[in-house]
Amino acid sequence: MKSKISALMLSTALVFGLGTAAFAQDKNVKIGSLSDQSSLYADVGGPGSTLAAQMAVEDSGLTKKGWTIEVVSGDHQNKPDVGSNIARQWYDVDKVDVIVDVPNSGVALAVNNVTKEKNKIFLNSGAASSDLTNAQCTPNTIHWTYDTYNLAHGTGGALVKAGGDSWFFLTADYAFGAALERDTTAVVKEEGGKVLGGVKHPLNTSDFSSFLLQAQASKAKIIGLANAGGDTTNSIKQAAEFGIVSGGQKLAALLLFISDVNSLGLNVAQGLNFTETFYWDMNDQTRAFGKRFSERMKNKQMPTMVHAGVYSAVTHYLKVLEKEGSNSHDGAKIVAAMKALPTDDPLFGKGSIQPNGRKIHPSYLFEVKKPSESKGPWDYYKLVSTIPADKSFTPLDKSTCPLLKK
């Protein structure tokens, strides 16, 4: 009897030990790049975000150390229901560990909820709504690249201080536009300015004439464009046709990407002020990444700050997994470890992640160059000022994130 009990205990110990070893050696990772692959934000994120994730995997060197890492992509079509359905499919069936990018705040807020429910990870670099680290924060989401607070204080604050003390908003009619108008309005009023009115336009509309005429009639010094991607470029082009800038009003591109400037051309875009957290021509490291990225893109474009954010976020995520020695597939636990480890990568330099999930790094106020100032392709920006990391994003004492409650 003693021999049988001993044998049973040994057998159980071996099975348990093998199971623990197998769990400890789980080095399988699946990354889902969820983006707009075919519409107004395709150049902002899209295929470029998938490439950025792949480059981060390659540069990590983990596949040469026995890790199996797969990157898949999906098109959310700028529809929250489509985005959340893809997220559920990925998490439940396809065993995706982490979703990156998601350039649409309505979709991002939906994916944010699904990610928490499934205890996975959402590394957002594309959506802007500051709600992701405020009222809608979760233990499973990190907001990486920029947000509406950051854009409002960078661009909005600078323009009011420069004399642009009356505003009219042209706003995309969904979560992102509402958040950007809200945060910029707060800054304008804090700086002593006033908002004369605003108008909301449908997402991805082609005709801005009636909206621009209202903005023009307001006589506001600043017309704040609380939109992005194709909506921004179309509104700027049509504003030029109406002679709005030549008539004395100024356009504030509250969210502008290098892909937008390339689409507009310097003749139209020159003089625009805007806030970004990454520019490919900042230093030797960003230039090296930009060159590698551009060479692998079909359209040869330089990376946007969304692409840079995907690369940076995936790089930090993989650093944490390597430090842990395996993938626990426990989203909240891994995100906690990501917050505990200081960030450091070639594109954003040294930084940190706040308890509410907000990634902290400097941001920059840029101005689009005149055609005569550009020295070659994609040489579009000149630096106006640098906003320190501790001034770029919502202070923790002003955050409404439930995770901060004691």
Image: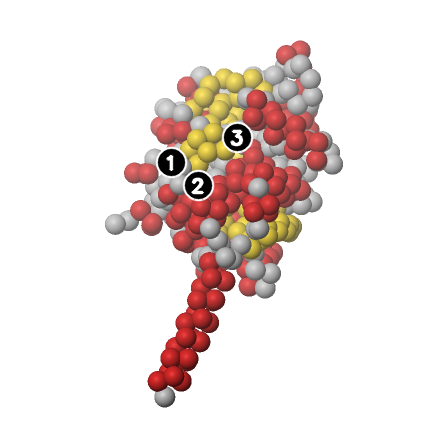
The amino acid type, in three-letter code, at marker 3 is Pro
Q: Can the viewer see residue 197?
A: no
Instruction: Tell which of 90 and 269 is nearer to you.
Output: 90
Which is nearer the N-term, disc 1 or disc 2?
Answer: 2
**Residue 352 vs residue 86: left or right?**
left
Disc on res. 130: 2
Residue 31: give x, y in percent of width and height: 57, 50
Residue 74: give x, y in percent of width and height: 64, 51
Q: In this view, does 119 lie above or below 147?
A: below
The span from disc 1 to disc 2 (Cα, nearest Å) is 8 Å
Residue 152: give x, y in percent of width and height: 45, 31
Q: Is residue 174 above or below residue 264?
A: below
Mark 2 surroundings within 10 Å by alpha-carbon count, few (fewer than 14), some (14 through 19), many (20 or more): many
Which residue: 40% across, 41% down?
341
Q: Is residue 277 above or below residue 132?
A: above
| Contact between labelled residues 2 and 1, with CB atoms less than 8 Å apart | yes
Q: Badge 1 is on which residue?
A: 394
Mark 1 surroundings within 10 Å by alpha-carbon count, few (fewer than 14), some (14 through 19), many (20 or more): many
Which is nearer the N-term, disc 2 or disc 3?
Answer: 2
Which residue: 57% across, 42% down?
61
Farthest-out residue, bottom: 1
The span from disc 2 to disc 3 (Cα, nearest Å) is 25 Å
Farthest-out residue, right: 298
The amino acid type, in three-letter code, at marker 2 is Ser
Q: Badge 3 is on which residue?
A: 346
Image quarter for residue 375? top right
Describe the element under mark 1 as helix, strand or loop.
loop
Which residue: 40% across, 29% down?
389
